Image: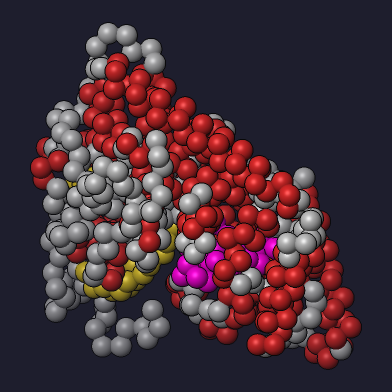
Amino acid sequence: MGARYNERFSKIESILLIENKIIDKDELKASCSYGVPDRLRPLLWRLLLEYLPTERATWTSFLAAQRQTYNDLVRQMIVEVAAQQSSAGDPLSGDCSHWGGFFADNTTLAQIDKDVRRLCPEIQFFQQTTKWPHREAVSVNLSGRVTQAELSIESYAVDKLAGSTKKRASAEYANPKDKGSETHWQVAERILFIYAKLNPGVKYVQGMNEVLGPIYYVLAADPDEEWAEHAEADAFFCFQQLMSEIKDNFIKTLDDSQCGIEQSMSSLHSLLSHWDPVLHAHLVARLQIRPQYYAFRWLSLMLSQEFPLPDVIGLWDSLFADVKRFTLLPFVCLAMMERVREQLLRGDFADCIRLLQNYPETDSLVLVMDAYAIREGRAERPSTKDDDSSSNGSGAKKNIAEKITDKLRSTISLMRK
Amino acid sequence: MDPSGAGTSNDEFKFKVVLLGEGAVGKSSLMLRYVQGNFNPRHISTIQASFLSKQLVVDGADIDLSIWDTAGQEKYHALGPIYYRGSHGALLVYDVTDAKSFDKVKMWVKELRRALGDDVVLFIVGNKVDLADSRTVETEMATQFATSVGATYEETSAKENIGVENLFELMCSAMVSRARAGPSNRGPSPNGGGGGTRRIRIVDEPTTGRKCC
């Protein structure tokens, strides 16, 4: 496999060669579908997420403009607001017309703050200080606003709760002491806050932190410092691009509309029932397992909570490279279930839920290969107990797989409207 | 469970318990402390709901306990019914240093009473009592509220392992007596304000021995 690996990687490199004035996006996606070389990933994700244009000559000016835009947003929404507040004095006295918005923002911020502090806890990265703190915003301690907010809101609504409004000790997570520095989680917090401000219809929903996490990590850990320096702004735009495709997962959680997460979950189960009726019958009919018990998180966060970060990143190479984004994802989920099929078939309700919620560590490339094999009709179908016709040959298998694929494609295209 | 009662003939119960409450009040930490016996100050935020199970013996009953730990954020609130449906008990958790999280508990009480009726055993849990200096919700007020809605109030610290084991055992004890009292104790519930005051015994002697032998 090493040879094919090298072949794929040199193909990617050849597409990115400087003399190619315009990067062929389709070709690029096709050659990235089984993963990308580490050192090219930061650039490739910017391209695959369609943040960076394919016309190479425009990159310099495009990036400069985008980064400027981001900095303007930070100035407007964070730096200037902070300056206003500190000059306005006490919110509880006098004119408080402009405080309403400030407090509303703080509610969002409090939510973000709780989550970014516990982002990717298995690695130290987000707790470390960044080499490139935001020049203007570093002096504004955004997370510091949260404690202040709680204080103000509580005393604002001195309600039936008899309780003192003592300041809350953030014992577990200390902010960096040094004034001119900030940690990576604080950068992530700023990105999510700006996103929430710009997208009032979505705001911030738990889980978005898990979507931003890998993107920001990939861009900020870029060994090429010229790029890493702008990780914050670029990660913001990459995140925004990705969110524009998956935000339905976060805003339409519960209505039974034809799009959003409910639809993705039910199409996963229908895919399972077509591909592996035996497993489907076991899980759904016998054990009464609903997709909400495990697949909600799989699908809404694109598996980012299921695997260690390096595997998530490997998996996302393929998901981002998917020409019809994100139709590969349910097939990866299906491949995951097939890999533990025997255990699932032997398990009771508790065994199965535990297994699906704590999926064993697996090479992401293996899952991607399985997923493509199923989608493209190359995979062998799982055995069906009472089905002797499985000796019909690969032609029949292929037809079935194609049928499923078509069915899924149509549901997904419906879903994406 | 599988080998049905060779030897001692304990009652067997399967109970489902759900943890509900505001984000970051420590629901996952309570569950992990109880089931796995550890504490991680940096637990990832819960999306969807996590499942764990545990077997234990309380009041002469073998209990197969399923615990569902839910996501805290308001946006996920509407998913609640999927996870709490069919629950025998609910732990409504708040953070004693965060008065807003107590308001959320009040809301859950209303919703659960409406959806599950009086049969569900409700416990209100003030977590993070180790942060005594930052406390904003007082025990007395929380106890009063719990009593007024027929719930039991307990305090815990998942971090310092205070009251966690006790909490789950009290809960199981209450569910056992509820179940033994019969499935159809509708109407004014006989044990009124939440029951569960009976202490747990380490089972040696079958206390009631009502299931023949």
Q: Position of residue A369 (x, y in %)?
A: 68, 78
Q: Nearer the viewer, residue A370 or A285?
A: A370
B107 vs A268, left or right, is left
Give the colouring mode of the picture: secondary structure
| Quadrant of the rendering where the N terminus of chain A is positioned | bottom right
* Residue at the front extreme of this rendering: A19
Q: Is residue B176 visible?
A: no
Q: Is residue A9 above or below residue A105?
A: below
Q: Position of residue A251 (x, y in %)?
A: 57, 41
Q: Which residues are magenta?
A: A301-321
Q: Nearer the viewer, residue A288 or A196?
A: A196
Q: Residue at x 16, y 62 (%)?
A: B161
Q: Is residue A124 visible?
A: yes
Q: Main secondary structure of the magenta part?
A: helix
Q: Position of residue A303 (x, y in %)?
A: 55, 63
* Residue at the right extreme of this rendering: A395
| Quadrant of the rendering where the C terminus of chain A is positioned | top right
How many numbered marks, from 0 up?
0
Q: Nearer the viewer, residue A4 or A109?
A: A4
Q: Residue at x 34, y 51 (%)?
A: A183
A157 vs A33, left or right, is left
Residue A306 forms part of the magenta stretch: yes
Quarter of the image for residue A120 reads: bottom left
* Residue at the top extreme of this rendering: A94
Q: Residue at x 53, y 79 (%)?
A: A362
